[in-house]
Image (cartoon, rainbow, N blue to C red):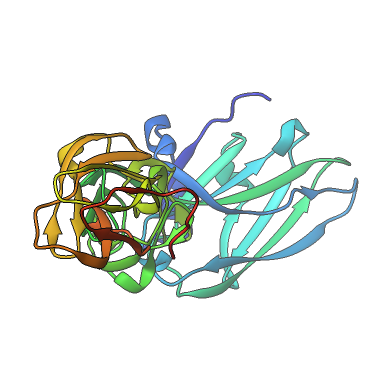
Amino acid sequence: MRKLNRFSCLLSGLPLLLAAAFNNFMDPAFAADMAVVQQSRPYVARAGAWQTWTDHLHIKPGMERRNLVLTFINGAEGRAPMTDIKVQLDRKPFIVFKDFENKNELSRTISGTLKPGDAVVTVQGFGPSGARLMWQLMTDKVTVTGVKPNPFSPKDTVVIDGANFSDKVSEVKVDVGGKHATVVSSTANQITIKPPQVSGGSQDVVVSTGGTKSAPFKVAALGQPHLTWVDVIAAPPSHPIVLSGSGFAPTPQENVVMFGTFPAHVTSATDKRITCTVPMMDFPRWHVPITVSVHGVTSKEKRLINVDHRVIENRGIHQY
């Protein structure tokens, strides 16, 4: 497809003829910072006849306060261009063929000119059979540049840095690992959330606002640990035991193992296995619950041990 030139002008508050006089080529760097939020189907001409097409711009709440650019591409999809064009926006004259100034593409800012809802776009076109015209509605790209803390746990308050967010919480949606987060506060370049419960590992953060959304931003999530197995059902204090499960921290000191209210000493750990010693306490004690916490997030499962003189191996008893 041949390269299309871009040019734009400020429209708000200017008569159409004066606005046309100030058409400029759109800066490619500016275009690279824009995202397409809506586009029309191609309008296809029939030879020797004027045709009329009607579409709607869908202006979502918040979009009316953003930078909006409406771009018309004459000769879309590499086809022949129309030879005459008339466009109305919201039932008012908007552009005509001469505004293209012999170029294939015309862009105009419409920021602040439309209210939330549907705005009617009426296009009249004339040209050779198969000539094509289409339009695109663009706005500033929503960009995520950083997330902290990273990694984070479900109990953390997470701050997302970026650009082109909204200062209204109601206009912002944040997904973490495909699940909705609770948005606490928002400005144009920073959002604070309470993250949803997601599994540990790499997750995508996506911010949506003003009819567009950011590219996924990779983060590391600390999921809730799961304790599924204890290798003994009874052991005395200071005896080493092995806990099995998932979501543990590979760094031993980042795992907090509790026997009831007594903390245990963790000697080694992987993401699925912890070795620790039964803490000192008065015994015998029956049905002492064992829990594992990683970065403040505690396992929900109840695994029980009897603290006693005898060591009794777990030979297949699943505790729930």
Q: Is residue 214 above or below residue 262?
A: above
Task: Work out whether residue 78 can be spotted.
Answer: yes
Image coordinates of residue 150 in percent, x first then y, are 24, 43
Residue shown at the point (14%, 62%) measured from the top left:
283
Image coordinates of residue 216 in percent, x first then y, are 43, 43
Say which quarter of the image contains residue 248.
top left
Residue shown at the point (40%, 67%) measured from the top left:
64
Residue shown at the point (54%, 43%) measured from the top left:
106
Residue situated in front as seen by the camera: 268 or 51: 268
Residue 134 vs residue 163: left or right?
A: right
Residue shown at the point (43%, 72%) measured from the top left:
61
Residue situated in front as seen by the camera: 316 or 68: 316
Say which quarter of the image contains residue 306.
bottom left
Say which quarter of the image contains residue 25.
top left
Image coordinates of residue 8 in percent, x first then y, are 44, 44
**Considering the image in quadrants, where does the N terminus appear?**
top right
